[in-house]
Image: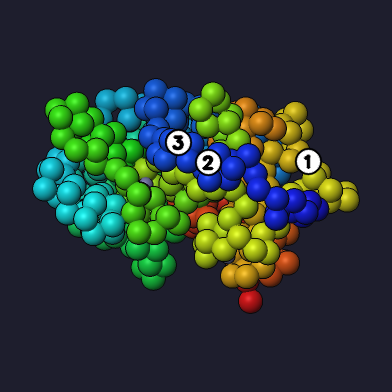
């Protein structure tokens, strides 16, 4: 296991921030690559993996998400007044829990299921998809409410990843279309909010962090939104739950004796758990410098063993992965909650 022996030294990123250097705060997803690259990553990680079938199912779902996003219809977006009001209140303008979802998300779900169905012949997931395809509007809206508010009571566990996938595409399209209103000279819709541990666009929890490479962001850490896929900057070596900077440690599977590592050629320490001794939460971080193809969602799904290890050590998971939280019948179990 790796601990943060250098935690008290300033990182180059912190020095840059303290020197007033501009770090791009927000990175919105690229619709052409977001789900396509995630699908490719899932297929790479699935090879020889203990949860291969689950990762391949997630890859099929992600493939359908990509197809859906390419043809998403125009959505109602907040007007300038609503954006201004959210900014004044320090709140995200498209809150997952309160935004009036357009019926387009349900049509999107049906498209997604239709895309998926012919590719699931012989799969245990086929029945779940067919049953969901037959659900009425009110039932779907109720399931979406439960999923977004993380209400386990009455949630259809088998259908949850499919509904979540449709909601992810809807919110990604909504964020991108809202951002596009800037072209008409409107104010920037997204900026810093009062809670830097939540997505500044939709207020959702992050899935994981990513430390990026690239000219203007090299080494900078971004949190990846579990719903809309926006990434927002937070300095490294800082707890993404309590915002503390003391007692931060890092664990990876690298040094676990006898642990079977994925036979993918993926860098062994590309995924770590950033743990906080103060609030006992952890959030995974994926490092592009170790493997340029890491994806916060895909690499999280493929590293459940790390969750088990860190949970055993008494830490509670902070990251939300809508495709894993409730799982399909073949999904690996959720990491147990910390005592
Ligand atoms: Zn978001
Ligand atoms: Zn903490």
How would you rate the neighbour count of disc 3 (Cα within 10 Å): few for under 14, some for 14-19, many for 20 or more? few
Q: Decide: is 239 above or below 129.
A: below
How would you rate the neighbour count of disc 2 (Cα within 10 Å): few for under 14, some for 14-19, many for 20 or more? few
On the rendered structure, is 147 left or right of 300? Answer: left
Quadrant of the image containing the C terminus: bottom right
Please provide percent x and percent y for residue 114.
33, 33
Give me the residue at 47% from left, 41% from top.
20
Q: CA distance from mark 1 to mark 3?
A: 38 Å
Q: Which mark is residue 4?
A: none
**Helix, strand, or loop for circle 2?**
loop
Residue 47: quadrant of the picture:
top right
Disc 1 versus disc 3: nearer the observer: 3
Q: Would residue 331 be seen by someone viewing this image from the given angle?
A: yes
Q: Which mark is residue 19?
A: 2
Please provide percent x and percent y for residue 86.
22, 54
Residue 337: quadrant of the picture:
bottom right
**Mark 1 or mark 3, earlier in chain:** 3
**Helix, strand, or loop for circle 3?**
loop
Residue ID for mark 1: 261
Please provide percent x and percent y for residue 191.
32, 45
Q: Residue furthest right?
A: 257
Give me the residue at 66% from left, 53% from top.
273
Closest to the observer: 327 or 13?
13
Please provide percent x and percent y for residue 106.
24, 44
The answer to whether marks 2 and 1 mark residues whose Cβ atoms lie closer than 8 Å is no
The answer to whether marks 2 and 3 mark residues whose Cβ atoms lie closer than 8 Å is no
Residue ID for mark 3: 22
On the rendered structure, is 229 left or right of 306? Answer: left
**Mark 2 or mark 1, earlier in chain:** 2
Q: CA distance from mark 2 to mark 3?
A: 9 Å
Q: Is mark 1 within 8 Å of ligand 2?
A: no
On the rendered structure, is 323 left or right of 260? Answer: left
């Amino acid at each position: 296991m790796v601990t943060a022996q250098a935690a008290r030294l300033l990182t180059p990123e912190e020095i840059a921030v303290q020197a007033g250097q501009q770090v791009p705060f927000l990175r919105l997803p690229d619709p052409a690559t977001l789900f396509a690259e995630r699908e490719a990553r899932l297929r790479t990680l699935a090879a020889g993996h203990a949860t291969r079938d689950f990762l391949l199912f997630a890859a099929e779902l992600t493939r359908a998400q990509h197809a859906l996003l390419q043809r998403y219809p125009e959505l109602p977006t907040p007007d300038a007044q609503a954006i201004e009001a959210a900014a004044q209140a320090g709140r995200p303008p498209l809150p997952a829990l309160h935004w009036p979802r357009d019926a387009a998300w349900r049509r999107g779900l049906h498209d997604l299921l239709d895309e998926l169905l012919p590719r699931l012949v012989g799969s245990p997931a086929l029945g779940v998809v067919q049953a969901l395809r037959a659900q009425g509007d009110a039932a779907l809206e109720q399931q979406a409410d439960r999923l977004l508010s993380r209400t386990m009571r009455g949630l259809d566990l088998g259908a949850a990843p499919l509904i979540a996938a449709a909601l992810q595409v809807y919110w990604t399209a909504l964020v991108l279309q809202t951002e596009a209103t800037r072209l008409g000279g409107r104010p920037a819709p997204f900026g810093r909010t009062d809670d830097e541990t939540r997505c500044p666009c939709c207020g959702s929890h992050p899935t994981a962090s990513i430390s990026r490479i690239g000219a203007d962001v090299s080494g900078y850490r971004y949190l990846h939104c579990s719903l809309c896929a926006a990434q927002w900057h937070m300095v490294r070596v800082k707890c993404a739950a309590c915002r503390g900077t003391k007692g931060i440690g890092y664990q990876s599977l690298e040094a676990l004796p006898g642990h079977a590592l994925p036979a993918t050629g993926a860098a062994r320490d590309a995924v770590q758990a950033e743990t906080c001794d103060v609030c006992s939460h952890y959030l995974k971080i994926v490092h592009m410098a170790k493997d340029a193809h890491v994806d916060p969602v895909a690499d999280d799904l493929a590293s459940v063993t790390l969750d088990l290890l860190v949970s055993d050590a008494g830490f509670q998971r902070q990251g939300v992965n809508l495709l894993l939280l409730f799982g399909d019948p073949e999904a690996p179990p959720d990491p147990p909650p910390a005592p």
